[in-house]
Image (spheres, coloured by chain):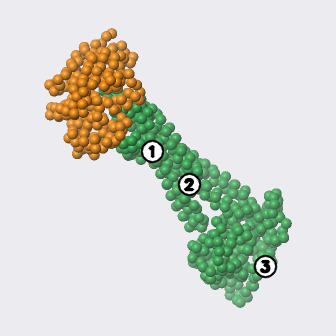
């Protein structure tokens, strides 16, 4: 269960302060944050991911306010509890798809789980590609591999940044449904940030960010 | 899938850059280590065969050549000296001289040198018979352990010598009497292992037949190999090895006196060796500095390899951060990549230098009959490995610091 309260952020050296609406997403629930480019969506997502430290406010995940964590503790918390699906499909290019999943467990300090990694890849329909290098996969397959990586640590929160923007309709629908399905199965809260209107109907909770919503006060 | 494993995979992922850095590190380490090894081996060999010899007396010529031919049985002798001239040194009652060993050089059997001498040779090198007996008359041979093994000589075998020090059928003394093997020495770890010993008279006997051929057939010299060599005042030998009783002032005085007052020269081996080392030291220094330069280039190559990979790997590094790996882990990843390259290169270099030493050792064994130990690992080589670790660290420090400062938000949002 994710709850945020009075979350604000300002970029170092600049005045504008982004204020973000309070958010509550329960376990196995999904929430869509919809808004045009430049509305501060990525900033919001990175705050939720603990990649940025908010100027003020709190982000609680199952009782832990990880906005207060710093350094190694925050890195560990993120690795274990938050699964990230990024806008661009980043991989460790020297490793195979499956090894990319294993390094995710390792980075979070979790024991290796080859079987678990294989199961996740199978569930996402890319089991046969486990031994391939990431660059040998199609864009759609790469996006599914990043979802697999986000799931492999059984996180409590899954964050997805524009997971479908690079995909055609068929793949977009497939990726979106896979995300919701797997998150629900894991009992994880799912937050998807996108400008992709195609996804709107899939989600019961939609928060629309207008360009004015992250109020910029001068 | 540990950080170490990931570092290895990253290195293999850019094989050419890694190979270049590896080769440079190997080249630098190999060069330095080969110099260390050769230096050590040569000094070992030279010092081992010093055998407490204070003075070498022989014909005038190059002092180094006299020492090399008489003590190490490398290169050719400087010429002969009359026995009359060295007679005083061969007198066992000489007040300053503990041991004097006469040497007659110049003949060989299948590349092994035949050394005409006296029993004193065995005393000087503390050589003992393993089998058979000491010679009792000319043409009898006591073979050094290594020489006997490699030539396949057994007690009772006979052979004809050849003139000179190289293996050449045309130079065989065909009309000369044959040598007989009467004894074989125990291995002593000295030059005594490498040569064939015989009474000094044997060489005269061989050359007697030469010069007297066709003229005075049948007139044979009769030699007594136990008599003092000084009795043959009209004969000549190559040189005398001398060990003094007591202090070195005597040695210096006697050396000066011989060099100034006689047609012979006297050489102090320790001084000659010191000069030789100093000469080798110059070349060694230059090669060693070349080694350091190559090591410097390898540092640069590792640095450039890592630094240039940073731009391409920015996304990967940000990803690792987002997966829970802290800045120290990213720092460690790049440092590992640098040190693994440097240390692997150094290990490769050490392997190559030892292989090189083995090849050089074979050359030395074939040409000079010297045995090198190729399976030594010098303490300095541990230092080379430790040095490689430092090299890797230094080369990786700046790229690793930059990697650890990766701005995750900017990189992933961009």
Q: Chain of mark 3?
A: B
- Percent from the top left, x then y, of residue B257? 82, 62
B281 relative position to B337: left or right: right
Asked which secondary structure carries label 2, the reply is: loop
Provide residue B8's location: percent of width, then percent of height: 40, 44
Against A94, is B374 above or below? below
Disc 3 or disc 1, which is closer to the eye? 1
Q: Position of residue B194 (x, y in %)?
A: 63, 69
For the residues labelled 2 and 1, the Cα–Cα distance comes to: 22 Å
* Residue A24 visible from this viewpoint: yes
Q: First in sequence, mark 2 or 1: give its number.
A: 1
Q: Secondary structure at mark 3?
A: loop
Pick whichever of labels 2 and 3 is earlier in the sequence.
3
| Residue topped by disc 3 | B227
Chain appearing in orange on the rendered image? A
Q: Residues within 10 Å of mark 3 (few under 14, many from 20)?
A: few
Q: Is disc 2 surrounded by few (<14), some (14 to 19) or many (20+) residues within 10 Å?
A: few
Quarter of the N terminus of chain B within the rendering: top left
Mark 2, residue position: B377
Return the disc, 3 or 1, that comes first in the chain's sequence: 3
The chain letter corresponding to green is: B
Image quadrant holding the C terminus of chain B, namely top left
């Amino acid at each position: 269960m994710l709850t945020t309260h009075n979350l604000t952020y300002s970029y170092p050296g600049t005045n504008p302060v982004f204020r973000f609406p309070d958010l509550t997403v329960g376990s196995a629930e999904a929430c869509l944050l919809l808004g045009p480019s430049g509305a501060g969506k990525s900033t919001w997502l990175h705050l939720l991911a603990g990649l940025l430290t908010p100027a003020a406010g709190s982000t609680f995940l199952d009782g832990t306010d990880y906005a207060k964590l710093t350094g190694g503790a925050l890195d560990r918390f993120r690795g274990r509890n938050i699964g990230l699906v990024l806008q661009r499909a980043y991989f460790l290019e020297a490793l195979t798809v499956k090894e990319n999943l294993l390094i995710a467990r390792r980075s979070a300090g979790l024991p290796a789980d080859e079987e678990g990694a294989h199961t996740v890849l199978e569930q996402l329909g890319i089991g046969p590609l486990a031994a391939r290098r990431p660059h040998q996969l199609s864009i759609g397959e790469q996006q599914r591999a990043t979802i697999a990586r986000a799931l492999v640590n059984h996180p409590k929160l899954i964050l997805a940044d524009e997971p479908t923007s690079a995909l055609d309709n068929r793949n977009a629908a497939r990726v979106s449904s896979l995300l919701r399905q797997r998150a629900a199965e894991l009992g994880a809260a799912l937050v998807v940030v996108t400008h992709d209107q195609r996804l709107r109907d899939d989600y019961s909770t939609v928060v629309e960010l207008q360009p004015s919503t992250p109020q910029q006060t001068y | 899938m540990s950080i170490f494993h990931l570092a290895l995979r990253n290195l293999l992922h850019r094989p050419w850059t890694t190979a270049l850095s590896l080769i440079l590190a190997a080249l630098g380490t190999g060069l330095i280590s080969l110099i260390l090894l050769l230096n050590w081996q040569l000094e070992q060999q030279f010092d081992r065969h010093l055998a407490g010899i204070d003075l070498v007396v022989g014909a005038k010529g190059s002092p180094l050549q006299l020492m090399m031919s008489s003590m190490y049985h490398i290169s050719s002798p400087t010429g002969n000296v009359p026995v009359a001239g060295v007679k005083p040194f061969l007198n066992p009652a000489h007040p300053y001289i503990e041991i004097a060993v006469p040497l007659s050089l110049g003949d060989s059997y299948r590349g092994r040198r035949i050394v005409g001498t006296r029993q004193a040779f065995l005393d000087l090198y503390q050589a003992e018979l393993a089998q058979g007996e000491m010679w009792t008359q000319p043409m009898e041979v006591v073979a050094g352990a290594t020489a006997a093994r490699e030539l396949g000589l057994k007690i009772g075998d006979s052979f004809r010598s050849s003139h000179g020090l190289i293996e050449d059928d045309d130079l065989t003394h065909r009309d000369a009497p044959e040598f007989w093997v009467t004894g074989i020495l125990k291995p002593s770890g000295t030059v005594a292992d490498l040569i064939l010993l015989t009474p000094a008279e044997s060489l005269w006997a061989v050359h007697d037949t030469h010069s007297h051929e066709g003229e005075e057939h049948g007139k044979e010299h009769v030699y007594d190999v136990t008599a003092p060599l000084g009795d043959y005042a009209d004969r000549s030998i190559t040189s005398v090895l001398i060990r003094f009783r007591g202090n070195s002032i005597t040695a210096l005085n006697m050396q000066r006196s011989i060099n100034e007052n006689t047609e012979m020269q006297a050489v102090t081996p320790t001084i000659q060796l010191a000069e030789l080392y100093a000469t080798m030291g110059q070349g060694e220094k230059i090669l060693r500095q070349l080694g350091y330069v190559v090591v410097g280039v390898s540092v640069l190559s590792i640095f450039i390899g890592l630094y240039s990979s940073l731009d391409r790997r920015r996304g990967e590094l940000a990803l690792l951060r987002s997966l829970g790996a802290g800045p120290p882990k990213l720092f460690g990843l790049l440092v590992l990549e640098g040190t693994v390259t440097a240390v692997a290169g150094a290990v490769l270099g050490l392997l190559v230098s030892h292989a090189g030493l083995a090849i050089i050792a074979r050359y030395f064994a074939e040409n000079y009959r010297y045995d090198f130990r190729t399976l030594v690992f010098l303490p300095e080589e541990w230092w080379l490995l430790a040095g490689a670790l430092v090299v890797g660290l230094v080369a990786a420090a700046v790229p690793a610091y930059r990697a650890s400062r990766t701005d995750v938000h900017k990189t992933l949002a961009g």
